[in-house]
Image: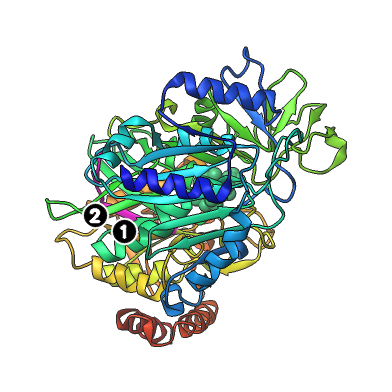
Amino acid sequence: MRALLGWVDRIAALTEPDRIQWISGDPRERDELLAEMVAQRTLIPLNPEKRPGSYLARSTPDDVARLESRTFICSEREEDAGPTNNWVAPAEMRATLEPLFAGSMRGRTLYVVPFSMGKVGGPISQLGVQLTDSPYAVASIGIMTRVGDDVTRLIAAGEPFVRTVHSVGAPLAPGQMDTAWPSNPEKHIAHFPESLEVWSYGSGYGGNAILAKKCFALRIASVLGRDQGWMAEHMLLIRVTDPYGRAYHVAAAFPSACGKTNLAMLRPTIPGWSVETLGDDITWIRPGGDGKLHAINPEAGFFGVAPGTGASTNVTAVETLTHDVIFTNVALTDDGDVWWEGLTDEAPDHLIDWQGRDWTPADGRPAAHPNSRFTVAAAQSPSISDAWEEAVPLDVILFGGRRATNVPLVVEATSWEHGVFLGSTISSERTAAAEGTVGELRRDPFAMMPFCGYNMADYFAHWIRMGGSVETLPRIFQVNWFRKGADGAFLWPGFGENSRVIDWIIRRLQGEAAAVDTPIGRVPAPGSLDTSGIDVDEEQLLAVDRTAWRAEADLTEEFYARFGDRIPPELAAELASLRERLR
Ligand code: GTP
Ligand code: SPV
Ligand code: MN
């Protein structure tokens, strides 16, 4: 406890808040915080008849997504951050941050938020504390993690914890009016993997501000996993039950805004199957005592993409969002409810858009920001599994991305090493979840490019190594719901119909579905994928074009070359045999 108190004192002395508030986890404390934010105009209460317990927040236009260019891994040695991370020496970053944080909380409250990733005291769980001057962040962390006195007691008893410090960088002079969304044009999201610290300055949004999420549960946790023999992954986690009542656990790594929440809440369109949700964004994986890898969802809520979430795409999400939700950057309806593109087929005649301006369909611009999101407790999802707070044995791992060309609907890896190779070669079209040009193709191995806290080649080697940690490994598949035909339309209906791919995968595990070998892996044999009742061009969906794949192999070689001789020999060998098979 002395360690925690001393640290809070030091940060308070640096940031000079007007007051310090320890978050206990009491529901009354939460209600007070929400009421304060309403008074401050940070939150707009929604119509309690339509959306009880729910609020809308609007950020500033420069604070709407993760900022990868402002995200830093500050390891002692540059090579430990690797060529795909922004590296700054720890001493240099501290020298940059100190003057920014000095006095940055003047006129504000410093909240001390103790949180647990995974259930409090759970065998795979980890503790952290976020010090923040953002009540919006406090409310979000309260939904996304388990916060409060239970955690403080564990820390007092000597449990280790990750230290995270966050300031929106908007001190208030005496008497100065606050703004609805305080932030600072200068932003830094800095990770210190050796001292297990995160310092975030200037942003109030999502992964930049809820430091338990990407900063801790992925970037710092990936380093802990490397050192301690476990894995922190950008994956959803589901339990799939087949028509015979057999249950399987499936984890899937798709890049940001590429369908994790959708698959996590999948409603199968084919009879006999059911899917339960365990997690939608982050999965921690460890060898279990039974010779299998075991997985947990370390989070307690969903911070999900709103646009594209509707009755025809993700009805479970729509049902999850009926009460007690914080929406950010969606549109406001005239009757005090929310709307976003894709919620309904037809837009309302009039809205207030995400920037607070009048909006009609004729305006032509989106009413909700493309990266607008909902924050909601996992427990209130109708699809939540009874087992969602427990560790479950992992049977299948999927890797995916958003690829208009080349990548088939589903490919089965022929071995763990081949599966790791597939994961390492994933590229995906950029989405609005971070800055950058939407649609531009970029490498996103294991969907972890923005989230790996160390050298990505060492991360690849860690995956290879984990293959030797248990007797029965999950089977690995690559999927792509986003392949397009010559007319530019998706070849695959997606959403609930993705259950047909899950069905094929599970029947592969049972030895009940046929596959054919291609140079890149196994694809469904003609007739083995259940396409009854839908009209799809299976040949195009599963086609493997050798010329295009030779070009893909060239790009993979270029990508690997960025890491020099740190690329594990197993992956270099996989690339060589791919080339061999493509000849
Ligand atoms: P993060 O929270 O950013 O990590 O992303 P996520 O992977 O959870 O993203 P999410 O599931 O919210 O996906 C967002 C977008 O993907 C929405 O626009 C969806 O409409 C779209 N999407 C999801 N599944 C499918 C699918 O099967 N087919 C198609 N075409 N689009 C999909
Ligand atoms: C992502 O970008 O992958 C997210 C949203 O899940 S955020 O928490 O903002 O990073
Ligand atoms: Mn994510």
In the rendered structure, which segment of residues is drawn in magenta?
389-399
Residue 42 on the magenta span = no
Residue 405 lies, with reference to residue 287, above or below; the image says: below
- Tag 2: residue type? Arg
State the image coordinates of residue 29 (x, y, percent, origin top left).
48, 23
Q: Residue at x 43, y 64 (%)?
A: 453
Image quadrant containing the C terminus:
bottom left
Residue displayed at 51% across by 74% down: 545
Q: Residue furthest top?
A: 49
Residue at screen point 69% across, 32% down: 345
Are the residues flagged by discs 1 and 2 in contact, CB closer than 8 Å? Answer: yes
Identify whether 34 is placed above or below 244.
above
Total number of numbered labels? Answer: 2
The quarter of the picture where the N terminus appears is: top left
Work out whether residue 423 can be spotted.
yes
Secondary structure under badge 2?
Answer: strand
Residue type, numbered disc 1: Met
Q: Which mark is residue 484?
A: none
- The residue identified by callout 2 is 286
The residue lying furthest to the left in this view is 290
With respect to residue 526, does 578 lie above or below? below
Could you tell me how far apart the alpha carbons at marks 1 and 2 are, in whole angstroms? 7 Å
Task: Give the crowd class for mark 2: few <14, some 14-19, many >=20 residues within 10 Å.
Answer: many
* Disc on res. 231: 1
